[in-house]
Amino acid sequence: MSSHSASAPALSAQAKANLPVHVAIIMDGNGRWAKERGLPRVEGHRHGVESVRAVVRACGELGIKYLTLYAFSVENWNRPKDEVDTLMKYLARFLKTELGELHRNNVRLEVIGQVYRLPEFVQEQLKKTQAALAKNNGLTLILALSYGGRTEIVEAIRTIAAKVKAGQLEPEEINEQVVAQHLYTRHYPDPDLLIRTSGEMRVSNFLLWQISYTEFVVTPTLWPDFRKPQLYAALEEYTRRHRRFGGV
Ligand code: IPE
Ligand code: IPE
Ligand code: MG
């Protein structure tokens, strides 16, 4: 396979000076990528793993602090069992084979979502990988696994309600900070940039609370074709935006 890095244009000085702290990506289009080639869907997922590798590496090199990857939604459990099984297998394998490079690149691993629903072998691998990378302080890679934005908010409401019932919290004390503190993402800043591949103009239940002022970049590129040049293009696009947060 040829490397893109030799031909990739460098990131502009403006983009370098204006990097997002937190990039989130809806990695979509693996199935269509495979279909275009007359291949089974799982082949798209297999190539998609290569894109994950490339993007994690590129974000680390740039000094981006947080990268959240939407890898598996709560709704994705409704896919055929074969496809789900293969995705889980690729995930565990990725964690195993990438550990060395992730560690060399000072990457830390976090997971958001209903981890308990993942197969035992995936949970084990996640725990091992997280433990091995726990002391790193470069890029924080956040994998959204069995993640649903509405589920996350429901769980937060439940915990907050229980605290009110137990007399630990007054209803009047519930504010945006309190809600944010009960989400899976309590330790991370909100995403600055959300990228969705494959051209779909929807959020598909991703980080609903956290993206209130996030900049969106939708690219027609299918995820298995999304590599460093496409990431750079999204960062350049982000640089051209004027974030106003409701101000003038
Ligand atoms: C994204 O690609 C991967 C996951 C959702 C796990 P898809 O599998 O959704 O591919 P398309 O959207 O069907 O092309
Ligand atoms: C969103 O992609 C979920 C992930 C990328 C993990 P989907 O392919 O599941 O979303 P829809 O069905 O197009 O909304
Ligand atoms: Mg899809």
Image (cartoon, grey):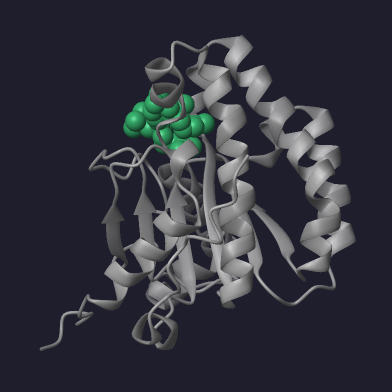
Residue found farthest to the left? 248
Closer to us: 166 or 198: 198
Instruction: Please provide percent x and percent y for residue 234.
Output: 35, 62
Closer to us: 152 or 44: 44
Query: Number of callouts in the render?
Result: 0
Q: Quadrant of the N terminus?
A: top right
The picture quadrant for ligand 3 comes to top left
- What is the quadrant of residue 72 in the picture? top right
Q: Residue at x 49, y 49 (%)?
A: 152
Closer to us: 189 or 70: 70
Q: Is 220 situated above or below 110?
A: above
Q: Residue at x 45, y 52 (%)?
A: 25
Q: Is residue 75 visible?
A: no
Q: Residue at x 38, y 75 (%)?
A: 172
Q: Is residue 105 visible?
A: yes
Closer to us: 176 or 173: 176
- What is the quadrant of residue 223 in the picture? top left
Q: Quadrant of the C terminus?
A: bottom left
Q: Is 43 situated above or below 29?
A: above
Instruction: Please provide percent x and percent y for residue 199.
Output: 26, 40
Instruction: Please provide percent x and percent y for residue 133.
Output: 83, 63
Instruction: Please provide percent x and percent y for residue 125.
Output: 84, 41
Q: Residue at x 70, y 35 (%)?
A: 91
